[in-house]
Image (tube, rainbow, N blue to C red):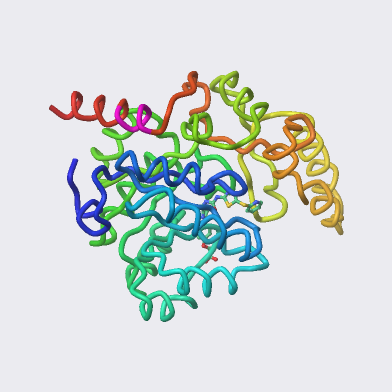
Amino acid sequence: MKTRICEMLGIQYPVFQGAMAWIADASLASAVSNAGGLGIIAAGNAPADIVREEIRKCKELTDKPFGVNIMLLSPFVDDIVDLVCEEGVKVVTTGAGNPSKFMDKFKEHGICLIPVVPSVAQAKKMEKIGASAVIAEGMESGGHIGKLTTMALVPQVVDAVSIPVLAAGGIADGRGMAAGFMLGAEGVQIGTRFLVAEECTVHENYKAKILKANDIATVITGNITGHPVRVIKNKLANAFLKAEKEEMGKDEPDMARFDQLGTGALQKSVKLGDVDNGSVMSGQIAGMVNKEQTCKEIIEEIVGQFEELVK
Ligand code: TUI
């Protein structure tokens, strides 16, 4: 259980809370950190002022380490990089791109960079530029995904790098955590299960969607845009898939159609609870996420199951 990740970050359990855009705020992140994992504030597409407020709140709510996730497609990415440096954030995870150009700044400020990688090549690149660890995230995950499954990606990344690897994608209990460790991971990142945590401030309609989801409730939309996203099937997902089918057959696909469908869709479901016309991002494991618990209960249950299994 105690791995290089725990030592490096000063946390009790090698369990990261997945960074869910517009969802993973100070309330969720501080609760996970207080329970012994690593809570992570998701910057997503939010401007720096909003993220600054969450960082400051989180510092009030916990004296344990926490991280900030930088979504590299954000229009505010440069501001967010400056912000985490200014605020003395110790751990930064990144997603949806290559964080290399920010590495000097992170090093200067003593920040541990832990990027999400979708492939062996990316993992090697990240090790070379000085990343502290990598998160190998399979396409079972919710939100923006790569092409490989967790089962195939994690052991190949583990063999390719010497820095610690965390497994992500399809993990929601002690069995999943143990499986990740059997593949060579030294920690796990869990998103979907924390969506229904009591401290998670996402709209209750969103939580209800996750609690009701079964094993085949998610689909991948946005392949045509180059940014495939796993979401719960709903009216918006169907409209997206229909538009993709139509545009795929054209010589000059109308890409603006996808911007129109996607813009603001996540906030619609997260903040307003419109889970029909909004984007409900979720991992494939949602079918197994059936009860609302505190972050402490979630982490203790997962870690307890893990310990029983590895004994
Ligand atoms: O980033 C995520 N998950 C996300 S980000 C997000 S917000 C968003 N919404 C709509 C479209 C796009 C993003 C929702 N969920 N997970 C980590 C992740 N990183 N998955 C895949 C990758 C990734 C992909 C390519 C990491 C590196 C990479 O490198 C390519 C390059 O640029 O060299």
Q: Is residue 289 toward the left or the right of residue 249 in the image? A: left
Residue at 56% across, 68% down: 80
Between 136 and 71, the one lying in front of the other is 71
Q: What count of labels does the image hold?
A: 0
Q: Quadrant of residue 143?
A: top right
Q: Is residue 78 above or below residue 116?
A: below
Q: Which part of the image, by quadrant, shows the C terminus?
A: top left
Residue 229 image point, x, y percent: 63, 45
Q: Which part of the image, by quadrant, shows the N terminus?
A: top left
Residue at 54% across, 63% down: 97
Tell me if residue 188 is in the magenta stretch: no
Residue at 72% across, 32% down: 273
Between 38 and 190, the one lying in front of the other is 38
Residue at 26% across, 50% down: 11
Q: Quadrant of ligand 1?
A: bottom right
Span shown in magenta: 296-300
Residue reaching furthest to the left? 311
Dominant SS in magenta: helix
Q: Quadrant of residue 272?
A: top right
Residue 23 image point, x, y percent: 58, 44
Residue 67 image point, x, y percent: 41, 56
Residue 81 image point, x, y percent: 52, 71
Q: Quadrant of residue 33?
A: top left
Q: Is residue 178 toward the left or the right of residue 25 in the image? A: left
Between 77 and 133, the one lying in front of the other is 77
Tell me if residue 297 is in the magenta stretch: yes
